[in-house]
Image (cartoon, grey):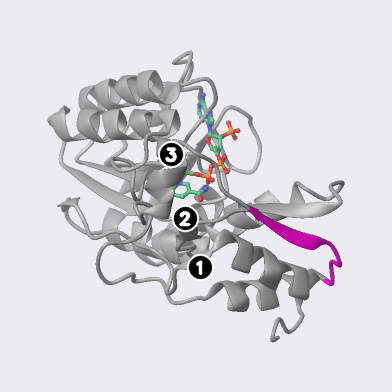
Amino acid sequence: MTTTLVTGGTGALGVPTVARLKANGNENGNDVRPLSRSSGGGNVVGDLVTGAGISAALDGADTVVHLASGQNHSDVAATERLLEESRRAGVSHFVLISIVGIDGVPLPYYRDKVTIEKLTVDAGLPYTILRATQFHNFVTRLFTAQRFSPVIVAPSFAVQPVAVEEVADRLVELATADPAGRVADIGGPEALTVPDMARAWKRATGSRRAVMPFRLPGRIFAAYRAGNGLVDGPANGKQSYEQYLSARYGATTAR
Ligand SMILES: NC(=O)c1ccc[n+]([C@@H]2O[C@H](COP(=O)([O-])OP(=O)(O)OC[C@H]3O[C@@H](n4cnc5c(N)ncnc54)[C@H](OP(=O)(O)O)[C@@H]3O)[C@@H](O)[C@H]2O)c1
């Protein structure tokens, strides 16, 4: 019997990851604990920022899958706490999700991720780190958030969106295998510009608003334009953005 604590188990990536770990666990008699600040739905209650409930949540845990992410630069301290408590609890595998391009795009959130990866490597726990590109549903939120805008603004650079379910599949594969260190990145099957994604989203949703591509000066934009957010090597993800849109909106997105 293996016990797995999944931080961020209620989030966009956490929900499919927990579902897959549970399906896997039912076959093998394993225990899966989704961590959340709220009770309900079989969650184990704990807060990585205050530390409340974390030690109890880790009691008897063999594996930790760390997906939680919060606001206000709290993730570094939260991860430090989780690693410390995991060591104390005798965790034998710490699995971390990270983001493709964090060392090539100077965003503050990415700098924190670089620190979190380093903390994980240096913690003295057997670990696995998987970097993923942006999820299809994350990029789509850029467009749905603009529902009151007369146009859809979209930054002129390419991303390589991936299906969140495929990232969850890979995480389960990694969490149920031996610790592997930093593994190959996962990204979707194609690099697409955000304006092209916005046009595909328009076709899928029937939106009539114009897409307005934009460029900004500065290092962050330049880094994305240089392709620093793309997977360097085989991408692993199979579902295209068009397939995601068809599944989500039930419409053909063909031109
Ligand atoms: N979104 C993307 O495109 C993308 C791409 C690559 C990697 N990632 C990484 O994947 C991870 C998951 O992303 P996501 O989009 O699934 O996140 P999300 O939907 O925003 O979910 C965030 C999760 O973090 C938990 N959380 C936040 N603060 C917490 C705290 N103080 N204590 C305990 N739990 C806390 C939340 O739990 P409750 O609210 O239930 O407490 C929630 O389950 C993140 O590390 C992110 O950086 C994301």
Residue drawn at x 51%, y 51% as measured from the top left: 13
Q: Give the range drawn in magenta.
A: 206-213
| CA gap, disc 2 and disc 3 | 30 Å
Q: Which badge, 2 or 1, is on the more N-terminal residue? A: 2
User: Label 3 amino acid?
Assistant: Ile
Q: In the figure, is residue 149 to the left or right of 179?
A: right
Residue 83 screen position, x and y as percent: 27, 26
Mark 1 surroundings: few (<14), some (14-19) or many (≥20) residues within 10 A = some
Which label number is shown at residue 220? 3
Q: Which badge, 2 or 3, is on the more N-terminal residue? A: 2
Near-viewer residue (96 or 58): 96
| CA gap, disc 1 and disc 3 | 18 Å
Which label number is shown at residue 192? 1
User: Label 2 amino acid?
Assistant: Thr
Residue 27 in sight here: yes
Residue 38 screen position, x and y as percent: 63, 29
